[in-house]
């Protein structure tokens, strides 16, 4: 059987991100595609529910070392046989091809991708070793920086290789790019509260829990219902996400309008996150099920963004519209 192409792996792993990556110009498209697949291998190792913690750490460290050296260690040989039916497992089975393709990139982009993906993978290993202990917002930001904030740095550094506008404003956009990553990850935390709990992680900072409230595990497993505490926790998470999203909009405004494919690549996940947050706000169901936007929303956002995404004013208006038109949760 012919192995899947890297683009087929991308589409199997995430149709949503593939929508944006496919809009990028070459060579950026192939570079971002590869960086994404590298991190999907890392995600597979970090999130694996059947793998013992020590084994996860060993493999994450081995993957990071392989990225830096360009050579896979024998410890990674087991990835070729993983098969739990998930898209990430499919990518992990092809880790050797992903690694080999890194050597074909232009040297400057390979350096950027290796630096940030290896650092992110090391950060994941550190958090697997530490375990699900989120005391306060700074702890949550530390975790989210490793898995998403560094991606904002990676993309900004790649954009700067070819876009004079980004080169000139590199430091500011790098800061905003990290905020962009934190925005998307905070929304992921909100919509995945129940699923993360099922795999043993609670990303609600203890400092976000009201005095006298039940343990968040009791809220997530349904053994206790406390609408007031749920509302306070959710409001704090949503407010945090909104702060990061405002910075993300500043990042979008800093990208050149004429590079529509690059703007769309960044704009689509931003608008998906805005919409997801809008339907999660004041919605207690996020404690018991994953929140997802519908296919109709995705289709409309992609269509409208293709037509008007070059306009910073339109982005501001459309984001506000996506927030206003979200339906309130059913009682």
Image (cartoon, rainbow, N blue to C red):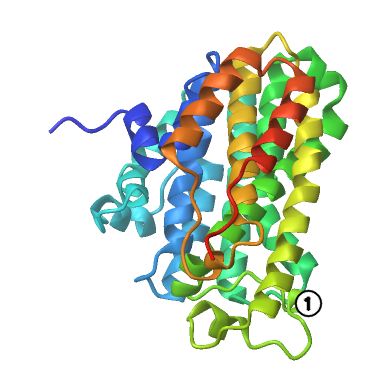
Residue situated furthest top in the rendering: 258
Camera sees residue 102? no
Residue situated furthest front in the rendering: 331
> In terms of secondary structure, where does tag 1 sit?
helix
Q: Quadrant of the C terminus?
A: bottom right
Question: In the picture shown, does residue 64 fall above or below 196?
Answer: above
Camera sees residue 317? yes
Residue situated furthest left in the rendering: 1
Q: Left or right: 13 with respect to 122?
A: left
Question: In the picture shown, does residue 162 fall above or below 117?
Answer: above
Residue 304 in the image, given as x and y percentages of width and height: 58, 20
Question: In the picture shown, does residue 303 fall above or below 231?
Answer: above
Res 163 quadrant in image:
top right
Residue 131 in the image, given as x and y percentages of width and height: 58, 76
- Total numbered circles: 1
For the point 55% across and 28% down, the residue is 301
The residue indicated by pointer 1 is 207
Q: Left or right: 271 with respect to 4?
A: right
Question: In the picture shown, does residue 188 fall above or below 2?
Answer: below
Relative depth, front residue between 142 and 109: 142
Res 231 quadrant in image:
bottom right
Residue 189 in the image, given as x and y percentages of width and height: 60, 60
Q: Left or right: 119 with respect to 13?
A: right
């Amino acid at each position: 059987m012919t192995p899947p192409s890297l683009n087929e792996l991308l589409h199997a792993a995430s149709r949503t991100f593939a929508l944006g990556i496919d809009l990028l110009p070459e060579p950026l498209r192939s570079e971002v595609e590869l960086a994404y697949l590298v991190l999907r291998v890392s995600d597979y190792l970090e999130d694996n529910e059947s793998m013992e913690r020590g084994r996860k750490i060993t493999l994450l460290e081995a993957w990071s070392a392989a990225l830096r050296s360009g050579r896979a260690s024998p410890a990674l040989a087991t990835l070729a046989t993983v098969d739990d039916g998930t898209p990430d497992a499919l990518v992990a089975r092809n880790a050797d091809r992903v690694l080999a393709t890194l050597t074909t990139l232009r040297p400057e982009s390979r350096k950027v991708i290796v630096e940030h993906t290896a650092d992110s993978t090391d950060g994941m290993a550190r958090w697997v070793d530490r375990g699900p202990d989120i005391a306060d917002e700074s702890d949550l930001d530390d975790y989210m920086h490793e898995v998403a904030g560094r991606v904002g740095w990676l993309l900004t550094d790649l954009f700067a290789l070819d876009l004079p506008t980004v080169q000139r404003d590199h430091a500011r956009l790098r800061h905003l790019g990290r905020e962009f990553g934190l925005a998307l990850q905070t929304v992921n935390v909100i919509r995945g509260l129940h699923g993360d709990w099922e795999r043993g992680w609670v990303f609600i900072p203890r400092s976000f829990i009201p005095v006298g409230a039940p343990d968040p595990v009791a809220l997530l497993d349904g053994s206790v219902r406390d609408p007031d505490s749920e509302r306070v926790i959710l409001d704090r998470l949503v407010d945090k996400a909104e702060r990061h999203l405002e910075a993300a909009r500043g990042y979008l405004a800093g990208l050149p309008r004429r590079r529509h494919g690059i703007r769309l690549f960044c704009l689509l996940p931003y608008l998906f996150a805005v919409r997801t947050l809008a339907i999660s706000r004041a919605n207690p169901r996020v404690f018991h099920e994953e929140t997802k936007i519908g296919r109709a929303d995705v289709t409309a956002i992609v269509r409208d963004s293709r037509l008007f995404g070059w306009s910073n004013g339109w982005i501001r208006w459309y984001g506000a519209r996506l927030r206003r038109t979200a339906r309130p949760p059913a009682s």
